[in-house]
Amino acid sequence: MPSPASSKATATDTGTSPVVGGEKKTRPKGGRLRRHPLATRAALAAGVLAVSTLGWSLADALTYPGDDSTAARLAGWAREHHLGPVVNQLENAQYEMDPPKVGGSLPQKDLDRMKNVPAGSAAPAGDVRLRPPMKPLVSPALKGEGVWRTLAAAHGRPLVQGTYVRPDGDHTSYQAAIAWISGKHTRYQLHPGLREPGATFTTPPSVPPGSRTGLLATWNGGFKITDGGSRGGFYLDGKTVGTLRDGAASEVFYRDGSIKIGAWGRDVRMTPDVIGVRQCLELMVDHGKVVDNIGDDAAWGATDQSRMFVERSGVGVTAQGDIIMVVGQALTASTLAHLMQQAGAVRAMPLDMNRAWPSFMSYDAHRDPHNPQPTNILDFENPATRYYHQATRDFVAVYAR
């Protein structure tokens, strides 16, 4: 009786394999099974299809309508394809290689913008007056720092006001901009984005011609709904994307044009009058105070991004129902929260971050009431006309009543 070794050698030498399932399979002299031609073609076809699908998806991400930069498009595409951790690591590495500057002075154009407070701007204007100066976070204050000026007006009232401050005593070559909006004299509209939150809505992903009369301001949405980054949901036109989560920080839009900001299920909830909801993470300011866990990385984004001094945005509401919106160039989660609280917010929430997404535009209707001229409150990646075009992500539009 031959040994197992001699049996194995015999099988190889004769070009046959042992019987498996009653079927004899042919081997080449090298000992590998010959793949059936049909199986080979199927595997090749599957590979080509996968590469083609990936290529089409990436091409779509690079060519969809809107003003997003190539870097923003690639990062968004990667997150949509479950590569968020890779994007986070790349962002962390880039931050470590090129951290924000400590010390120094504001660039001249930023100084000019801060100082540009029109003479007589503190004069009363009907039942809406310019706010008293905000105490700057850095002393001594620069000229114009913390002083409010009119950004957009209607019927002689300064309904949208803005000011500029340096965010902290270390990052003195950066600005944060703060906007105040009269809640009594304005109405609010939630818009979806073309790709985020990722569904088809009746409301357009832009402020199209014919819908711009009375437009005063726009601001950006929050973290993405579709990849779970916002840890909440989006509701508009009777349709929900994601899940409206109890406790989530929420912008809530009502049929009468008003807006409320609070914790879902506690301050705000679904009623027949609600026409829109945008959730993002947790409240940063609650009951007029910055929340105790503002230094908790897990609450405000991936990895250690809550402590990075990067571009951020947030929105809050005052005790009188007016809106506070902050965008800044070098903010942590903590400094963003403290800015909103110091500006008067009793409840406030984070919105989006990084250079591509924060935005606040005001609109001047003097030249053309039906097509007001937009202006960025700070210089970010997208142009001031961002929401006149199809926007990638959701946003809020503000109109005079």
Image: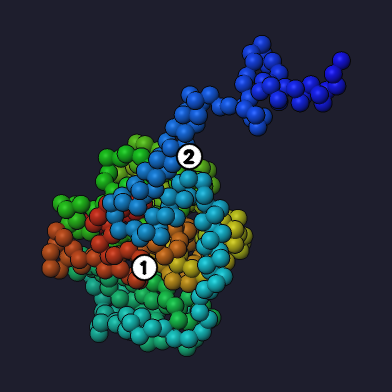
Residue 220 percent location from the top left of the image: 37, 57
Q: Residue at x 62, y 21 (%)?
A: 26
Mark 2 or mark 1, which is nearer the start of the sequence?
A: 2
Q: How is the image coloured?
A: rainbow
- The quadrant in which the N terminus is found is top right
Q: Is residue 391 left or right of residue 133?
A: left
x 30%, y 68%: residue: 376
What count of labels does the image hold? 2
Q: Amino acid at mark 1?
A: Phe
Residue 314, label in figure: none
Q: Position of residue 138 (x, y in %)?
A: 49, 82
Pick the front one: 277 or 102: 102
Q: CA distance from mark 1 to mark 2?
A: 30 Å
Above or below: residue 271 compared with residue 133: above
Residue under pointer 1: 380
Helix, strand or loop at label 2? It is loop
Label 2 neighbour load within 10 Å: few <14, some 14-19, many 20+: some
Q: Quadrant where the C terminus lies?
A: bottom left
> Residue 81, how many percent across, how many down?
48, 45
Q: Callout 1: few (<14), some (14-19), or many (20+) C-alpha neighbours within 10 Å? A: some
Q: Is residue 115 above or below residue 200?
A: below
Q: Which mark is residue 243?
A: 2
Front residue of 223 and 32: 32
Reply above or below: 217 against 280: below
In which quarter of the view is residue 183 placed? bottom left
